[in-house]
Amino acid sequence: MSIDLGVTGDFHVHLRDGKMMELIAPTVREGGVSIAYIMPNLVPPITTIDRVVQYKNELQALAPKTTFLMTLYLSKELTPELIHEAAKLKAIAGVKCYPAGVTTNSSAGVDPNDFSDFYPIFKALEEENLVLNLHGEKPSTDKDGEEIHVLNAEPEFLPALKKLHSDFPNLKIVLEHCTTKAAIDTINEINQDNKGPIKVAASITAHHLSLIVDNWAGNPINFCKPVAKLPQDRKALVAAATSGNPWFFFGSDSAPHPLHAKQVHVGVCAGVYTQALAIPYIAQVFDKQGKLDKLKGFVSDFGKQFYEIKEEDLVSKDHTILVRKEQQVPDVVSQGDLKVAPFKAGEKLDFSIEWKSIN
Ligand code: DOR
Ligand code: ZN
């Protein structure tokens, strides 16, 4: 059995910088992914055109056959002029918004209770047909009457998403790494009423299609933000991913951390590393549902449609071929002293990928 998945895309990727980038950037292709949408949460975050261009060049040198789509980090340093200039230079595909403090390297982020300072940026994005990528969580607070915690942080963010969509109806927005039935229902509702092109989409990771609360409580390797939720949430995510609805597409949120930073008792880094086996992990879930026929839409067609990616933007047109061939997830991915634990380390997967060269 083999399935031609065409030119695949992973629309939410963390490739880091320095030694980690050298180790991880080549694993995009190993995981069966052709187009990678790159997150800007480096230290310091990527907020200038020079830096985003430089970062893309570094990545391209490490992974010549991967098409990189770049983003800037939403912060006070961005201006509408900078967005217009970045659009003119085709330097970015979107801007990533992190509420301050919700996850790894988000301290420079924004207050999701009041986005109004950033409305000029959103207007510029809307005018340029660029995308706003939202980390959709409210920051935790234990104040009486407005307790926000890891389990309700995403549902509590959804009114802010709806408000942004109603204030900027032509702005393309992605609610990244959805983890709840509430989020899935909201995205479906927005799209069911919409007759025109998709304006509000959602990305779904590989790990959230497998994990629930129990899998990260006690296992830091599976801890990420937003955290995996309850079985009914996972069920809604699997249904959405395999639905064939084009407003749901793949974004792995693969987020590598050095193994030693995961093996601590306090202050565990959030992030699950899935890049090196991205497509086989997803295929496993689709196969279990008897929905392999819906896989190409999710990992290939829908993301490219939403981002309006053209053939001429691709550095390689090679196709990913999914084959039913067992493989074992390695215990670690490493280079020198640097070690990263992959998702489902040591487990067997039923699928592998091959590349079909297209000129
Ligand atoms: O788990 C996560 N890790 N969630 C994010 O939003 C960021 C990411 C990271 O950069 O490690
Ligand atoms: Zn992320």
Image (spheres, grey):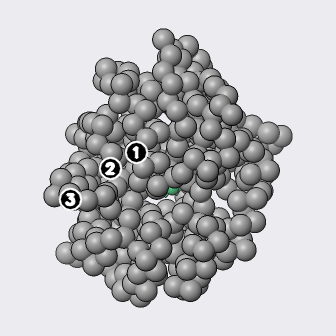
CB within 8 Å, label 1 to label 2: yes
Which of the 4 image quarters holds residue 316?
top right
In this image, 28 relative to 128: left or right? right
| Amino acid type shown at disc 2 | Trp
Q: Position of residue 75 (x, y in %)?
A: 53, 79
Specify which label sits upstream in the sequence, 3 or 2. 3
Residue at the image position 70 percent from the left and 59 percent from the top = 56
Disc 2 element: loop
Q: Is residue 87 above or below residue 305?
A: below
Circle count = 3
Specify which label sits upstream in the sequence, 3 or 1. 3
Is residue 325 something one can see in this rendering? yes
Which of the 4 image quarters holds residue 330?
top right
Of the 4 image quadrants, the one containing the C terminus is top right
Distance between mark 3 and mark 2 Cα atoms? 11 Å
What is the crowding at mark 2: few (fewer than 14 residues within 10 Å), some, or many (at least 20)? many
Label 1, on which residue?
A: 302
Q: Position of residue 213 (x, y in %)?
A: 35, 43
CB within 8 Å, label 3 to label 1: no
Label 2, on which residue?
A: 247
Label 3, on which residue?
A: 194
Residue at the image position 55 percent from the left and 13 percent from the top = 325
Distance between mark 1 and mark 2 Cα atoms? 7 Å
Q: Position of residue 58 (x, y in %)?
A: 77, 57
| Amino acid type shown at disc 3 | Asn
Disc 3 element: loop
Residue closer to the observer: 16 or 120: 120
Q: Is residue 274 above or below residue 69?
A: above
| Amino acid type shown at disc 1 | Phe
Disc 1 element: helix
| Label annotation for residue 325 | none
